[in-house]
Amino acid sequence: MSEIPYVNQLGDALDAAIRRPAPARRRLRSSRRRYLAVALAALVMAGGGAAIAEMLTDPVELGLGNVACFRGADTSGEVAIITDPERHPTDLCAAALPGFDAQDLIACHWEGHGVAVLPRGGRPNCAAFGLAPLPDSYEAARLHVADFERAVEALQRRTGCVPPRRFARRVQTLLDRQGWTGWRAVAGGGGGPCGRVSVDQAARLGSIASNVNARRRTVTVRGYAPLEVQRIVWGSGSPGAALLQTSGERCFTLAGLKEHVRRALAGARVPVRFRVAALPPNLGLESPRGPRYAAGCAVYAGPHLTFPDGRTEVVVELLQRGAG
C-alpha cells in the first residue's frame, strides 16, 4: 500500500500523469480532490447529497462521522463536508461557511446520511426542514469520541514507531480504560513499520475516523512510514515540498534532477527510487514547472512511500516530455 498525499497538492494534471489514484478519503468519492484545512478537519466542497450518501446514523457513528454544512435552505445545494469531533457541528459549519455564525445554524439528524447543518432562516426546529433532531445521546457520544481521538494521538506521539500489532495492544488498553465496552483494536493493512490509527494529513496526525468502524466496533491500526520521514518528504515547509518550486527554477536534465532530489530528501535516510513519465498531452503544469516541462526539461511531480519487505522507501515521480 502506498501513501500519496502529494496528489492533492498537484491536482488533476499530475494525478493523471503518474497514473496513480489518491488515497481514499473516508466516504468521499475519489473524483473530489480539492481540499481545504479547517482546524483538524478534512473539508471538501461538493454538490448535493451524493457526496455524503454513506454517512452514518448511530450516535457513536454520528460522533465519528462527517458533518454536512449546507449553504442553502435544504439538503440539495452546495455542501462542505467536515470531520472533527472536537467541535459542535454548528461551530464547525460556521467556520466552513463564511458569513454564518453558529447561532444562525441548526444541526439535524438527516436519516440515512448523518448530521446536516443548515441556515435557520427563521425556522424553529429540524422538523421545519423535514429532518429529525439529533439524538439526545449525540453530544455525549461526540465528546466520548473526541476524548478517545485525543488520547490516541497522544499515545502515538509518546510511543513513536512501533509495529502495528504491538501498537494495537496499547490501543486496546486505551479502549478498555475509557469504557469502550465490546470494542477491539485490530492490526491490518498499510504495510509500513509504524502502527498508527490517525490518518496522516500533510505529515501530521489527523483524524482517526477512517480507521474506526462503529458498526463492527473495531479500531484498525495500520502500518505507516515514520513521521520523521514524512516530514522530510512532504511535510509543510519540508525539503520535499520545496522541490515543487525548485525543480522549475532552472532546466534540469533527468540525471541532474535525480541528484537534486536525492540531496533534498537525504535527511529522510531511506532509499529513493525514480519513475519517469510524460504528462498526457491534454494536461499541463503551472509555472515555474510548466514552461520548463514544455521546453523539454525534467520536472518533479511528487513522492509516495512504499514498504517492500516492511522497509520504507520513497518513490519519486518525475515528468519529462517523450518519456515512456
Image: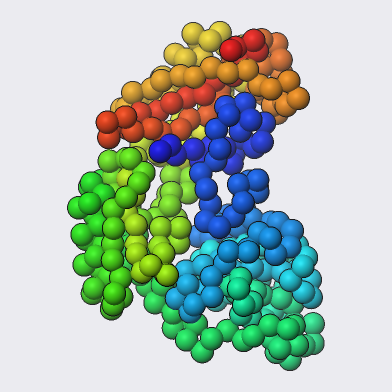
Q: Looking at the picture, does residue 261 appear above or below residue 65?
A: above
Q: Which residue is nearer to you in this view: 76 or 318? A: 76
Identity of the residue drawn at 60% across and 12% down = 323
Identity of the residue drawn at 60% across and 73% down = 112
Image coords of residue 194 (percent x, y) = 28, 45
Q: Quadrant of the N terminus?
A: top left
Q: How is the image coloured?
A: rainbow
Q: Which residue is nearer to you in this view: 153 or 185? A: 185
Please say whether residue 224 is visible from this viewpoint.
no
Image coords of residue 80 (percent x, y) = 67, 62
Horizontal side, residue 60 vs residue 151: left or right: right
The quarter holding residue 38 reads bottom right
Q: Quadrant of the C terminus?
A: top right
Image coords of residue 110 (percent x, y) = 64, 77
Q: Looking at the picture, does residue 84 appear above or below residue 305?
A: below
Identity of the residue drawn at 25% across and 68% down = 174
Please say whether residue 311 is visible from this viewpoint.
yes
Horizontal side, residue 267 vs residue 92: left or right: left
Image coords of residue 161 (percent x, y) = 25, 46
Q: Which residue is nearer to you in this view: 261 or 66? A: 66
The quarter holding residue 2 reads top left
Horizontal side, residue 251 vs residue 190: left or right: right
Identity of the residue drawn at 21% across and 61% down = 170
Q: How many marks?
A: 0
The quarter holding residue 13 reads top right
Pick out the residue farthest to the bottom. Answer: 124
